[in-house]
Image: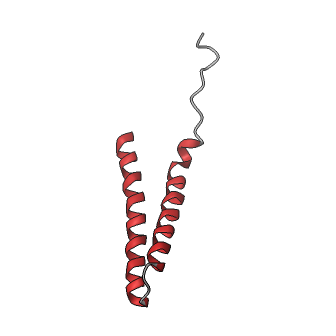
């Protein structure tokens, strides 16, 4: 189960970066610039990926481990 979750996180990061990059390349072609929007797209995709990654793993970071009950000696 954990392996599937980690694989999903990896695909999420890759998708964000690729979509940002392709969007930047498209805007560069549209505006006639060389690499301005491509770099901005990579930056935006990376920021979006890590923000989303943080939001997805935040519940796992805040979990407290199960404590032993006092009568289990």
**Residue drawn at x 37%, y 52% as measured from the top left:** 8
* Residue 38 point in image, percent of width and height: 44, 75
* Residue 31 point in image, percent of width and height: 43, 90
- Vertical side of 31 occupied by 54: above or below: above
* Residue 64 point in image, percent of width and height: 60, 35
Residue 46 placement, left or right of 11: right
> Is residue 1 at least partly visible in the picture?
no
- Vertical side of 45 occupied by 32: above or below: below
Q: Nearer the viewer, residue 18 or 5?
A: 18
- Vertical side of 18 occupied by 55: above or below: above
**Residue drawn at x 57%, y 42% as measured from the top left:** 61
**Residue drawn at x 57%, y 31% as measured from the top left:** 65
Q: Nearer the viewer, residue 66 or 27?
A: 27
> Is residue 10 at least partly visible in the picture?
yes
Q: Residue furthest front?
A: 34
**Count of marks placed on residues:** 0
Residue 63 placement, left or right of 2: right
Q: How is the image coloured?
A: secondary structure
**Residue drawn at x 42%, y 58% as measured from the top left:** 13
Which quadrant, please, contains the N terminus? top left
Q: Residue furthest top?
A: 73
Q: Residue furthest right?
A: 70
Which quadrant, please, contains the C terminus? top right
- Vertical side of 56 occupied by 62: above or below: above
Q: Nearer the viewer, residue 12 or 18?
A: 18
């Amino acid at each position: 189960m954990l392996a599937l979750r980690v694989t999903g996180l990896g695909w999420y990061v890759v998708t964000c970066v690729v979509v940002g990059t392709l969007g930047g390349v498209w805007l560069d072609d549209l505006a006639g610039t060389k690499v301005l929007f491509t770099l901005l797209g990579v930056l935006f995709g990376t920021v979006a990926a890590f923000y989303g990654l943080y939001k997805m793993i935040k519940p796992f970071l805040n979990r407290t481990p199960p404590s032993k009950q006092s009568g289990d000696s």
